[in-house]
Image (tube, rainbow, N blue to C red):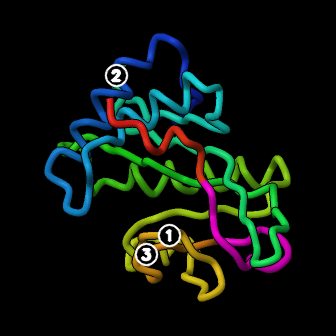
Amino acid sequence: MTIQLRHETLDDIAAIEAVTTAAFADAPHTSHTEQFIVRALRAANELTLSIVAETLNQIVGHVALSTVTITDAHGHKTTGWHGLGPISVLPAWQGQGIGSRLMKQALAELRAVQAAGCVLLGDPAYYGRFGFQAHAGLQLPGVPPGYFMALAFHGPVPEGIAHYSDAFNATA
């Protein structure tokens, strides 16, 4: 089985939505709005990267990245950071390394464009293997601190509050 990773095309949009919906259907700790978030990011032209995993002419995985701003206690904004997510793999294809390949590709592409770093919300046991760590000085309001993690590509992880696109509020 060969898995090809590539950037999304217009023809992939329906399949990406289906993969995202299926991937989160039985997931704990979800509001089941992930597919709407991807749609809203795309509509707002705020997808930094949108990478699909394809095999046998079927999209089986997807990862979305968008810009994030971090504001410190003095109101200074740090840019150059990106938020990873949602990341989705069809349930029948999970556990085969597709999510890991999507993660590695996404991080490599962010490094290639000289991004400062990447943040995400997720399971520390899974994302720690890619170098993500929780940082006491970096917060996402309403989220348990251990589940909001960052990976700096150069320089330190900034302190402050992370602000994602308004598209993350999409519910339909």
Indicate left or right for 42 with 172 as reference: right
Query: Residue at label 3?
Result: 147
Q: Which residues are magenta?
A: 151-163
Question: Which residue is depicted at the point 43% across and 47% down?
Answer: 86
Indicate left or right for 50 with 13 as reference: right
Residue 60: percent from left, percent from top? 33, 34
In the foreground, 80 or 159: 159
Quadrant of image for the C terminus = top left
Measure the alpha-carbon separation of dots 3 and 1: 12 Å
Q: Residue furthest front?
A: 74
Q: Is residue 43 above or below residue 120?
A: above
The amino acid marked with disc number 2 is: Ala
The amino acid marked with disc number 3 is: Tyr
Q: How many C-alpha atoms fall within 10 Å of the one at disc 2: few (<14), some, or many (≥20)? A: some
Query: Residue at label 1?
Result: 141
Q: Which mark is residue 67?
A: none
In the foreground, 31 or 113: 31
The earlier-in-sequence mark between 3 and 1 is: 1
SS assignment at label 1: loop
Residue 114, located in which quarter of the rendered image?
bottom right
Q: Check if residue 161 falls in the magenta segment.
A: yes
The amino acid marked with disc number 1 is: Pro
Residue 30, located in which quarter of the rendered image?
bottom left
Q: Which mark is residue 15?
A: 2
Q: Residue furthest top?
A: 11
Residue 43: percent from left, percent from top? 55, 22
